[in-house]
Amino acid sequence: MMVITGMRPEKTGMLHTGHQGYHTYPQTSSARTPKNHSILSSQVVPGRRTPDQPEQQTPLDGIKPLPSKRSTRCVVPQVLRHYATGSCLAKNISGTTQLLLPPRLFQRSSTAKPPQHVNYRTLFLCDMQEKFRPTIKFYPQIINVAGRLLGSAEALDMPVIVTEQYPKGLGPTVSELDVSQHKVFPKTCFSMIIPDVATELEKHGDIKSIVLCGIEAHACVQQTVFDLIEKEYDVHVVVDACSSRSMVDRMYAFQRMKEVGAHLTTSESILLGLLKDAAHPKFKQVQKFMMESAPDSGLLSSSQSGTPV
């Protein structure tokens, strides 16, 4: 509680009635309250509290002030003017004015720990379909890396969400990626965040981070990023597992996704980030997907030629 000394009681216009409520007595011309000092004005009857008036309780019970190294002494009029619209209370006790600051400057004393999230990450596998095979740049390498991510997610018991863009015309997910044990969501919308996928995410209420891979980087992957960022998810785009039919589209899509707040990362980096410790019980199962370096998918040659990442 902050204590301000050196002020005479009549300057504040507050009267201690002997109850828990504090009321005002009429202001005199010599101590007139400025209009913007609403903290000193009161709608209650001056003087003693009447029976029909409920006993006022301070809203700060059970709350302790945050520690501060700064001086707690200040000029009362300035403080009252600053906190005129806040939930503060001033009172006089033996000539000393005490000021209770708004609740936002206080913290509740609690030893409760935040909930521990078991599965707070999920893998998004975007439209890795058969008909794209002849046209997507470095598609075999992209499929290889996506397979590493899929196998690792399964080993770590992460939820996996798979989509297929107009499967009637573009075919199913490529045979190299076994998604038979996961629910596959058909769509025509470019973004993966269709109503069925949004409902699936809600079933996993603790999901915070999305690991995203697939095609095409400048279309479905990028629009998925926009929707996830808008929903305040933490999005990790695995650049060696995303591609487009054009390297220009691919690389500028990475730049734009980075600008809106997505994290650009590589497959090995994200897998090590998921494990965090070599003592992880699933380390050996995930390590096998990193024994060989990820295949080159043209990222280095594109960045050296001046295309932004």
Image (cartoon, grey):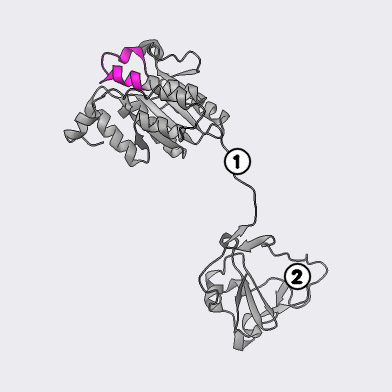
Judging by the rendered image, the residue that carries numbered circle 1 is 115
Relative to 136, is 168 on the left or the right?
right
Where's the N terminus, which quadrant?
bottom right
Where's the C terminus, which quadrant?
top left
Which residue is at the far front? 279
Judging by the rendered image, the residue that carries numbered circle 2 is 20
Nearer to me, 135 or 237: 237
Q: Residue at x 81, y 66 (%)?
A: 52
Q: Position of residue 177 (x, y in %)?
A: 40, 15
Secondary element type, mark 2: loop
> Identity of the amino acid at label 2?
Gln
Does the image show residue 107? Answer: yes
> Would residue 129 be counted in the magenta stretch?
yes
Q: Position of residue 62 (x, y in %)?
A: 69, 60
Residues in magenta? 127-145
Give the alpha-carbon distance from disc 2 to disc 1, as whole Å: 37 Å
